[in-house]
Image (spheres, rainbow, N blue to C red):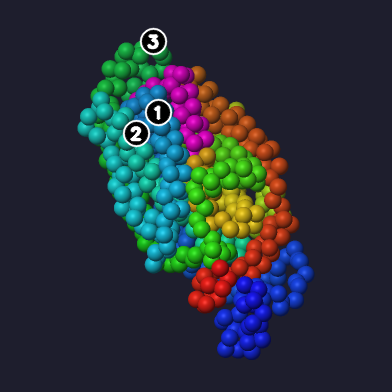
Amino acid sequence: MAGAGGDTPQQGADGPGKAAAPRAALLQEEPPREPALERPAAEVRQEDRLSVCTKLCYAIGGAPNQVATSATAFFLQIYLLDIAHITPFHASLVLFIGKAWGAVTDPVAGFFISKTKWTKIGRLMPWMLGCTPFTIVSYFFMWYLPPFVAGRVVWYLTFYCLFQTLTTLFQVPYSALTMFLSPDQKERDSATAYRMTVEVLGTLIGAALHGQIVASAHASDHCTVNLTVNATDSSSALSNTSNLAEPLGLQSHGRDVYMIAAGVIGGVYLFGTLILFIGVKEKDDPYALNSDKAIPFLKGLRLTMKHGPYLKLTASFLLISTAVQLEQSNFVLFCTHAASLHNHFQYLVVTILVSAAVSIPFWQWFLQQFGKKSAAFGISWMIPFAVMLVTIPNLVLAYVVAFVSGLSIAASLLLPWSMLPDVVDHFRLLNPHAKGHETIFYSSYVFFTKMSAGIGLGISAASLEFAGYKTGICRQSSIVILTLKILIGAVPAILIVTGLFILLFYPITEKSRKETEFELELLRKSHPSADNLSENEADIWI
């Protein structure tokens, strides 16, 4: 190699022989560069910039998953209890096993995706396109009320697990796609902000659209006939008798409106995936060396689990995301049974999500000005207001709580997906010859958040079972009401405070993030990818 370098430097500098000049000799001729903490914006290459259209198409592509997830988070539990008439214990099994199954499929999906070879449309895009039709079908049947009663638990568990699997096969490559849009961190952060804004809008559409369609299934009118009957435990036998006739018409109506909502959201899935495919071009790893090989999945997983910044970030936000999940899944039940706000729950949900959607640009500006760790503490804003709503269930206060909760939820949605690329870049700098680790990071992160959310939702539904929640009745016992208040107020507050405390020890600051960005840029320039080299240069560099 040294001999070859001594034979051709002059020829490489003069013209025709430049393609044959060894890369090492060319690098030795470059004058040393002074290290800098921040690379000027002017140095961002034009091909690394993302157009507004690309960012919007990327963001719209993730919206369908959020539409469906939002509808599921807010309404699946009350659907299982009040429409399908599944006991709280069985509902807790469906929710927990479904979430746990979805969590288990995340690393499995990450393994297979990391083994995928590059195609004409990319390495990640085929997964998203291929799973979409099956996702639509599984989502529809998840809200279908089968004519039999004995096997309903198995029915919902099967299609909920199938839906979780298919959304994983979409979400893991979609999340990892952030790293393959551009090598520039600011462009990725901007694309993430677009994504979070549209995803919160998707969450809003999912909750509002689904809520408006199914609101009549949970109206309080049917309770006026047997309200007195259900008021005391001593009349439970009479209550059961009077409730037998009432659910027949109500259940038929509830079945129809929930199926309509499922069909509408299925159409949203198809639209979003087509926009993603048309408007986004996946780029290969911009920092990969020609000699790089894909990192073995198990080895990559071990390295990931030893990476300190990743562990702290994951531990923090899995607690915070569990708190948000508990708020979402119990909010409708709380409004219906504990706060006498059953005629307002769909509008409160819309208030939460509108607040979250419009505050995403604010949080994007805030994290750029004051840092991502500082922005994370905005998540705690919802705690005092939620406690106030639990202690003083007032309509005006409920809307205030909904607005402030939206601000906190927006921060909890934006920050982990904005901070995770920084963790991946930090790992990349420490392991410059590793390739294909992005899907491992994203799939394992989603695994932990889903698993924690599944445990939280399972415990939530099981708590209602132990408290004596009765399906199909209009007034629950005082113990059930107290349990709902704890699930809405105390438990999320403890989880959020603990998660923010862990985040204090997260080591990546704005200064270190800029240093990492600069070092990776030097790596990209000194170790070009195969796409940027001629065949002769590639052979010599290897």
| Figure quadrant of the C terminus | bottom right
Q: Circle 1 is placed at which residue position?
A: 93
User: Which residue ends up furthest to the top in the rendered image?
Assistant: 234
Residue sitting at 61 percent across and 34 percent down? 495
Distance in Å between CA atoms under marks 3 and 2 = 34 Å
Instruction: Say which residue label 3 marks.
Output: 234
Of 371 and 315, nearer the camera is 315
Amino acid on which the number 1 mark rests in the picture: Leu
Position of residue 3 measured from the top left corner of the image (x, y, whole percent): 64, 76
Identify which residue, 449 or 356, lies in the foreground.
449
Give the vertical position of 451 relative to 351 (above or below).
above
Q: Is residue 184 left or right of residue 144?
A: right
Percent across and percent down for residue 287 are: 58, 64
- Magenta stretch secondary structure, dominant: helix
Residues 431 and 177: in front is: 431
Label 1 – label 2 distance at C-alpha: 8 Å
Magenta highlight range: 450-477
**Image spot of residue 362 (x, y percent):** 63, 56
Q: Disc 3 or 2, which lies upstream in sequence?
A: 2
The residue singled out by tag 2 in the image is 157
